[in-house]
Image (cartoon, rainbow, N blue to C red):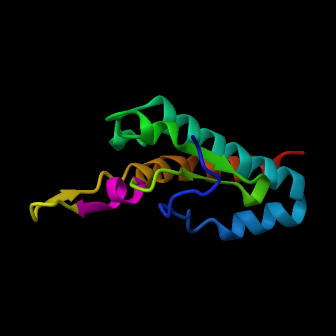
């Protein structure tokens, strides 16, 4: 069952604050719609692809994919994973025998893929008549 609490895995898109502020000042409803669209795109990418290098969610039992979700709306919307082990898959972890499993950085890659799309969507919304 999906809980209301998302995992602590998070990545913020940086460098777009000026565009965000400009669109928000011009048209708050349009800005909220652009942000909402980004979260939906990222959830879709996370659930429809199992390749971490392409921003998809790694697949083992399917539980991590089932835990992908979006909470909030508009500028307050966020996407993430509700499984408590999501940060260990993202960032890496030690094993019981003292080894180390590298993180897969699937969420970071999802954000990296989305960032230029988000930037273009912001520009399109600002110039939209």
Q: Quadrant of residue 53 in the image?
A: top left
Q: Is 82 or 43 nearer to us in this picture?
A: 82
Range of the magenta residues? 86-93
Give the residue displayed 71% in from the left and 55% down from the top: 77
Q: Position of residue 79 (x, y in %)?
A: 60, 51
Query: Would you say 72 lies left or right of 40 here?
Result: right
Give the residue displayed 87% in from the left and 67% down from the top: 25
| In the image, residue 87 lies in the stretch drawn in magenta | yes
Query: Would you say 8 lies left or right of 37 here?
Result: left
Residue 126 shows up from this direction: no
| In the image, residue 66 lies in the stretch drawn in magenta | no
Q: Position of residue 120 (x, y in %)?
A: 64, 48
Tell me if residue 76 comes above or below residue 34 in the rendering.
below
Residue 34 shows up from this direction: yes
Query: Would you say 80 lies left or right of 39 here?
Result: left
Give the residue displayed 47% in from the left and 47% down from the top: 110
Query: Would you say 45 lies left or right of 121 here?
Result: left
Quadrant for the N terminus, please: top right
């Amino acid at each position: 069952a999906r809980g209301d609490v998302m995992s602590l895995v998070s990545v913020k898109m940086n460098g777009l604050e000026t565009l965000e502020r400009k669109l928000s000042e011009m048209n708050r409803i349009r800005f909220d719609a652009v942000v909402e669209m980004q979260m939906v795109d990222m959830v879709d990418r996370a659930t429809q692809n199992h390749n971490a290098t392409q921003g998809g969610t790694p697949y083992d039992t399917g539980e991590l994919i089932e835990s992908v979700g979006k909470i909030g709306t508009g500028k307050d919307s966020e996407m993430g994973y509700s499984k408590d082990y999501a940060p260990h898959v993202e960032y890496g972890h030690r094993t019981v025998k003292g080894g180390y499993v590298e993180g897969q950085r699937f969420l970071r890659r999802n954000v990296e893929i989305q960032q230029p799309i988000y930037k273009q969507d912001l520009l399109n919304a600002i110039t939209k008549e």
